[in-house]
């Protein structure tokens, strides 16, 4: 149901790869709510993914940009302003990638060049987006910028690997830049800490199906879906949340406030009573590493 919450607003949406992507759902909802926006992703992702299809659906254009490349970002902002006919009101940063996770490197045996890539793509790119926007004065007063994060920034989730460090940095950039951009231009900057969600990036995490099940059992409201995350993003882009800034906002069905739930405990007890023949010495391999 549309409330035209974003009527007249112009945006840039990073990270819609395919119909599972959280950014894809945000684009669909933003379109429904009356926004105009450009879509962006890396050139490779644009060749491999379905972004042009989404652009057609939302009557918009796709601009290739590697979010770690400042020249690409400058071009993205300049072209977006030209295409949309004015400065930007909202930005979604929905970007994450870890070569260490992809290559199955253990957290205690990280490849440091890969770690640099993880941090650059998944966190520093957020700073680059904000710094580029500010230098070009590309965001309107009371504009809203949102990046997607995960609770592993605060708590240890073994299999999340160096992405946990990237998310901690991402959230910190949101706060640090939120102060500067808020004071100068009333631009608000927040991160949303989303439940585990089945997407291309999410499924790369080892043991993801069990993590999803565990989070579902722990969360009183159940896991938040990508569609629900899109709804939340729309509220943050809208004028209804003008004084919310520098926050990491949990959108996780209550997971982050839980210690143990009855449903998770019941499942754990089943495991204790189970007469399976798995080797306890190898049990660690079955966890989220
Ligand atoms: N899926 C989950 O369980 C989950 C949970 C919490 C937070 N998140 C976060 O949500 C965001 C979106 O991920 P998703 O789950 O929708 O997966 P996704 O794979 O659909 O999206 C990740 C996107 O990042 C893009 N990307 C990678 N490198 C890039 C670069 N250098 N420049 C520009 N774009 C680049 C990819 O092309 C892709 O479109 C990520 O920040 C992710 O960490 C995901």
Image: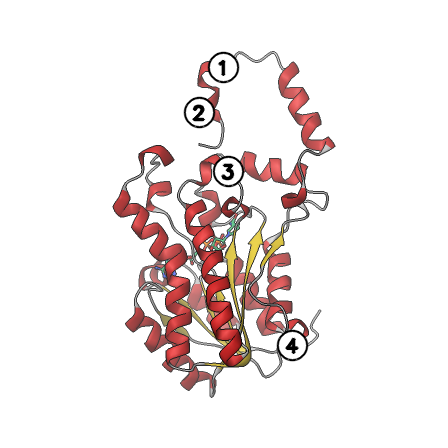
- At mark 4, the secondary structure is helix
Which of marks 3 and 4 precedes in the sequence? 3
Q: Which residue is mark 4?
A: 239
Which of marks 2 and 3 precedes in the sequence? 3
Query: Badge 4: how crowded within 10 Å, few (<14), some, or many (20+)?
Result: some
Residue placed most toward the observer, 36 or 280: 280
The picture places residue 188, in percent across and down from the top left corner, at: 55, 71
Query: Badge 2: how crowded within 10 Å, few (<14), some, or many (20+)?
Result: few
Question: Residue placed farthest to the left in the image?
Answer: 113
- State whether residue 84 is above or below residue 62: below
Mark carried by residue 264: none
The picture places residue 88, in percent across and down from the top left corner, at: 49, 80
Q: Which residue is mark 3?
A: 157
Q: Which residue is mark 1?
A: 280
Which of marks 2 and 4 precedes in the sequence? 4
Q: CA distance from mark 1 to mark 2?
A: 10 Å
Which of marks 2 and 1 precedes in the sequence? 1
User: Quadrant of the image for the N terminus?
Assistant: bottom right
Q: How is the image coloured?
A: secondary structure
Q: Quadrant of residue 161?
A: top left
As drawn, is 264 to the left or to the right of 21?
right
Residue placed most toward the observer, 201 or 158: 158
Q: Residue at x 63, y 17 (%)?
A: 272
As drawn, is 99 to the left or to the right of 218?
left
Q: Residue at x 49, y 63 (%)?
A: 174
Q: CA distance from mark 3 to mark 2?
A: 14 Å
Q: Is residue 93 among the parts visible in the rendering?
A: no
Q: Residue at x 49, y 34 (%)?
A: 207
């Amino acid at each position: 149901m549309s409330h035209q919450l974003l009527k007249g607003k112009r945006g840039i949406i990073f990270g819609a790869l395919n119909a599972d992507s959280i950014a894809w759902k945000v684009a669909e909802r933003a379109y429904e709510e009356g926004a105009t926006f450009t879509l962006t992703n890396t050139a490779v992702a644009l060749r491999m993914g379905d972004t042009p299809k989404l652009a057609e659906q939302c009557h918009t254009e796709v601009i290739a940009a590697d979010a770690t490349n400042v020249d690409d970002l400058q071009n993205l902002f300049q072209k977006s302003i030209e295409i949309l006919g004015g400065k930007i009101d909202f930005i979604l940063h929905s970007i994450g990638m870890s070569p260490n996770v992809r290559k199955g490197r253990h957290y205690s045996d990280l490849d440091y060049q890969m770690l640099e890539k993880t941090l650059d793509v998944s966190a520093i790119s957020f700073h680059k987006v904000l710094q580029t926007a500010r230098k070009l004065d590309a965001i309107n007063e009371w504009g809203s910028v949102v990046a997607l994060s995960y609770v592993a920034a605060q708590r240890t989730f073994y299999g999340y690997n160096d992405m946990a460090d990237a998310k901690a940095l991402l959230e910190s950039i949101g706060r640090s830049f939120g102060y500067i951009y808020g004071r100068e231009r009333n631009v608000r900057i927040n991160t949303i800490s989303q439940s585990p969600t089945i997407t291309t990036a999410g499924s790369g995490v080892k043991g993801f199906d069990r993590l999803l099940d565990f989070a579902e059992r722990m969360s009183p409201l159940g896991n938040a879906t990508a569609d629900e995350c899109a709804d939340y993003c729309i509220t943050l882009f809208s004028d209804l949340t003008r004084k919310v800034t520098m926050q990491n906002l949990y959108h996780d069905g209550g997971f982050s406030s839980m210690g143990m739930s009855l449903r998770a405990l019941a499942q754990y007890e089943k495991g204790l009573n189970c007469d399976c023949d798995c080797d306890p010495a190898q049990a660690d391999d079955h966890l989220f590493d």
